[in-house]
């Protein structure tokens, strides 16, 4: 895929999100298909991360929005309410969330691009955080707690 096609797809995604209430990736894929843009959900996930688009709670359910600096405190406060616990052993950090909330919390962590975190794996209600160094695990937990609005 060339750069022009990617830019066209990114512009279409931003336009759709700005003009419609889109609550999930399936809806967004379908809207893009109507514009004759075929995209896999894996590619769409990457696009959303690159564009800084996040799912925000609204009075009518979740909706995709382009993240702004003003959205960060709201997102942190909301995320703090989704987390049940943050625990670790000698190697990994495990974050427990309410059902269906782990992927959104992991997305927020991934968006921070913390050099102390190699990556996250999110299920439905559990996130495994892989720290870069087990020697710095306490620092990583403190960073995570800060990012999630727990401290």
Image (cartoon, grey):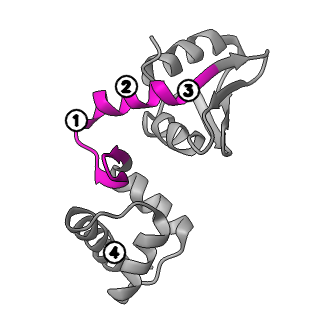
Mark before the other along the chain sequence, 4 or 2: 4
- Residue indicated by mark 3: 83
Residue 77, labelled with which disc? 2
Residue 34, labelled with which disc? none
74 vs 84, left or right, is: left
The magenta region covers: 56-85
Mark before the other along the chain sequence, 1 or 2: 1
Q: How many marks?
A: 4
Q: Is residue 83 magenta?
A: yes
Which-is-in-front pick, marks 4 and 2? Answer: 2
Residue 69, labelled with which disc? 1
Measuring from the top left, give residue 102's x and y in whole percent. 59, 40
At 67% from the left and 20% from the top, the residue drawn is 133
- Image quadrant assignment for residue 70: top left
- Could you tell me which secondary element the residue under label 1 belongs to? loop
Measuring from the top left, give residue 88's x and y in whole percent. 72, 17
Structural distance between the alpha carbons of marks 4 and 2: 31 Å
Residue 108, can we see it?
yes
At 37% from the left and 78% from the top, the residue drawn is 31
- Residue indicated by mark 4: 9
């Amino acid at each position: 895929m060339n750069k022009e096609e990617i830019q066209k797809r990114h512009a279409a995604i931003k336009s759709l999100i700005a003009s419609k209430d889109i609550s999930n990736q399936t809806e967004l894929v379908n809207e893009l298909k109507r514009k004759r843009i075929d995209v896999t959900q894996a590619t769409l996930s990457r696009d959303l991360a690159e564009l800084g688009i996040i799912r925000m709670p609204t009075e009518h359910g979740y909706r995709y929005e382009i993240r702004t600096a003003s959205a960060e405190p709201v997102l942190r406060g909301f995320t703090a309410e989704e987390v049940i616990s943050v625990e670790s052993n000698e190697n990994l950090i495990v974050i427990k969330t309410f059902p269906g909330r782990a992927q959104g919390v992991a997305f927020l962590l991934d968006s921070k691009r913390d050099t102390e975190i190699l990556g996250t794996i999110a299920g439905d209600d559990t996130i495994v955080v892989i720290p870069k160094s087990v020697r710095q695990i306490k620092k990583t937990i403190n960073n995570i707690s800060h990012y999630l609005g727990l401290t």
